[in-house]
Image (cartoon, grey):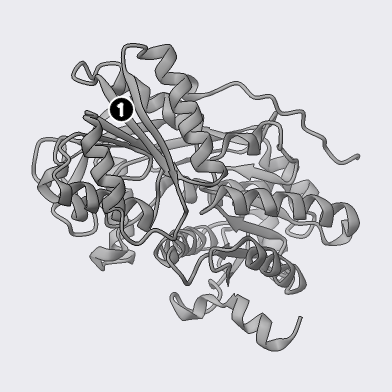
């Protein structure tokens, strides 16, 4: 790969957060014996430019903070570099090759299920072809269900609840929405968006057969600049609610357009709790926007509040307010696996320990299911309210609006069956 090409792909974390995170250690016997060992290199392959650059930068803050904390007291020496995928699968695959050439042994990605699927296929082939340079893939946000079902891979670990799990959590609220008679389904036209709408229809049919699906619409991902035509159709349909898995600008622009045309219905979302969506809706979203997540800042627990305050201290700018517990638990799980494996170079040994990860941070627990590498954790559902309303101590991105927790679904209830037939390496 030529120098110009590599420099376009590689954006070392010095651009935003200082040089690769400085390694510090706990006093465990293994750590003490390995303080001079080569760090375990992690490569973040994500959109750092283009329409979804804000999502990539938000991920970088989360991962960097988690690594800072883990390196400050763990035997795992983790070093992070980022590579710009520009939101394109081809660029992500080129970044993967560059990262491996640069010595990365753990790949981090999540903001596109299509990209995650391409990376899984490429990593499967690479690990078979070059067993001395095997890599692991840690996925924090790509939630298309097949990735831990028929497409499951020993080298891939998912730390976010997949789409079917998130939809089931939202259905807990939809079942009680007696005003809901008609719903509009809209999503991004790629594997994840298609899977969300397909599963939403199925779960609505089984749990709310009285609710009519008035329309099911897919739009190009990341290319729609004006959602007004879609918003007009939503309002004209007479729907009392919109159901969407949209994320990034595709969500923000959608909710802005809906507000502008005067749509007054509910929004059932995967990601309506951040990245500009609350500010876009303003008062029109109060009591009407529902979001599902692995954690929300207004979870009523002292430990959770401490976690959120610690992040805000590290990143004080309101626009940087996008923290994910699952990304923190992901890095905690990796650190645990490295220390239990007593190696930072044998990724097979690390993977075998990662299969059995069980971590707790600020009172939030998560565990990896070995059968399909799907992380299991509590899920929460929140409703948008004004900051200061009961249950809303913290707002989102300085918008003046936050999310009141209206449901918490235990990990055991959120868990879904899997069709994965895991093939593991010999030995």
Query: Which residue sits at x=51%, y=47%?
Result: 141
**Residue 102 in the image: above or below residue 213:** below
Q: Quadrant of the N terminus?
A: bottom right
Measuring from the top left, give residue 128's x and y in whole percent. 88, 52
Measuring from the top left, give residue 238's x and y in whole percent. 21, 29
Residue located farthest toward the bottom when viewing the structure as drawn: 3
Q: Secondary structure at mark 1?
A: strand
Q: Nearer the viewer, residue 303 or 86?
A: 86
Query: Which residue sits at x=44%, y=75%?
Result: 17
Q: In the displayed structure, does residue 306 sit left or right of residue 121?
A: left
Q: Nearer the viewer, residue 25 or 226?
A: 226
Measuring from the top left, give residue 220's x and y in whole percent. 47, 53
**Residue 124 in the image: above or below residue 292:** below
| Residue 301 visible in this rendered orientation of the protein | no
Query: Which residue sits at x=56%, y=58%?
Result: 26
- Would you call the spot at circle 1 few (<14 residues within 10 Å), some (14-19), or many (20 or more)? many
Q: Quadrant of the C terminus?
A: top right
In the figure, residue 5 lies in which quadrant? bottom right
Q: In the displayed structure, does residue 119 sit left or right of residue 112?
A: right
Q: Which residue is mark 1?
A: 183
| Residue 169 visible in this rendered orientation of the protein | yes
Q: Nearer the viewer, residue 106 or 309?
A: 106
Query: Which residue sits at x=50%, y=80%?
Result: 14
Measuring from the top left, give residue 411's x and y in whole percent. 47, 26
Q: In the displayed structure, does residue 65 sit left or right of residue 231?
A: right
In the figure, residue 208 lies in which quadrant? top left
């Amino acid at each position: 790969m030529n120098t110009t090409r590599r420099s376009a792909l590689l954006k070392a974390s010095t651009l935003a957060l200082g040089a690769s995170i400085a390694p510090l250690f706990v006093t465990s016997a293994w750590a003490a014996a390995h303080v001079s060992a080569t760090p375990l290199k992690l490569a973040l392959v994500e959109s750092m430019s283009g329409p979804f650059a804000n999502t990539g930068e938000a991920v970088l803050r989360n991962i960097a903070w988690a690594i800072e904390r883990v390196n400050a007291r763990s035997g795992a020496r983790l070093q992070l570099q980022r590579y710009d995928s520009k939101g394109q699968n081809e660029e992500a695959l080129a970044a993967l090759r560059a990262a491996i050439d640069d010595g990365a042994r753990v790949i981090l990605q999540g903001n596109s299920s299509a990209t995650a699927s391409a990376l899984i296929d490429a990593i499967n082939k690479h690990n078979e072809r070059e067993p001395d340079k095997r890599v692991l893939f840690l996925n924090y946000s790509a939630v298309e269900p097949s990735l831990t079902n028929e497409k499951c891979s020993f080298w891939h670990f998912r730390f976010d609840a997949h789409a079917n799990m998130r939809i089931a959590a939202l259905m807990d609220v939809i079942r009680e929405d007696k005003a809901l008679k008609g719903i509009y389904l809209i999503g991004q036209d790629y594997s994840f968006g298609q899977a969300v709408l397909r599963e939403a229809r199925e779960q609505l049919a089984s749990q709310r057969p009285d609710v009519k699906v008035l329309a099911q619409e897919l739009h190009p991902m990341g290319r729609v600049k004006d959602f007004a035509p879609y918003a007009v159709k939503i309002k004209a349909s007479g729907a009392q609610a919109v159901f969407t898995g949209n994320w990034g600008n595709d969500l923000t622009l959608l909710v802005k357009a809906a507000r502008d045309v005067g749509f007054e219905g509910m929004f059932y979302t995967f990601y309506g709790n951040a990245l500009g969506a609350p500010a876009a809706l303003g008062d029109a979203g109060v009591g009407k926007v529902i979001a599902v997540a692995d954690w929300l800042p207004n979870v009523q627990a002292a430990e959770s509040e401490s976690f959120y305050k610690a992040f805000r201290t590290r990143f004080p700018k309101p626009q940087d307010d996008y923290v994910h517990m699952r990304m923190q638990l992901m890095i905690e799980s990796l650190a645990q696996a490295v220390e239990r494996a007593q190696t930072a170079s044998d990724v097979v040994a690390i993977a075998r320990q990662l299969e059995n990860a069980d971590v707790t941070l600020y009172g939030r627990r998560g565990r990896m299911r070995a059968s399909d590498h799907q992380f299991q954790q509590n899920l929460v559902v929140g409703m948008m309210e004004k900051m200061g309303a009961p249950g809303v101590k913290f707002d989102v991105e300085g918008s003046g609006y936050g999310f009141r927790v209206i449901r918490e679904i235990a990990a055991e209830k959120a868990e879904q069956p899997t069709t994965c037939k895991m093939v593991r390496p010999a030995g």
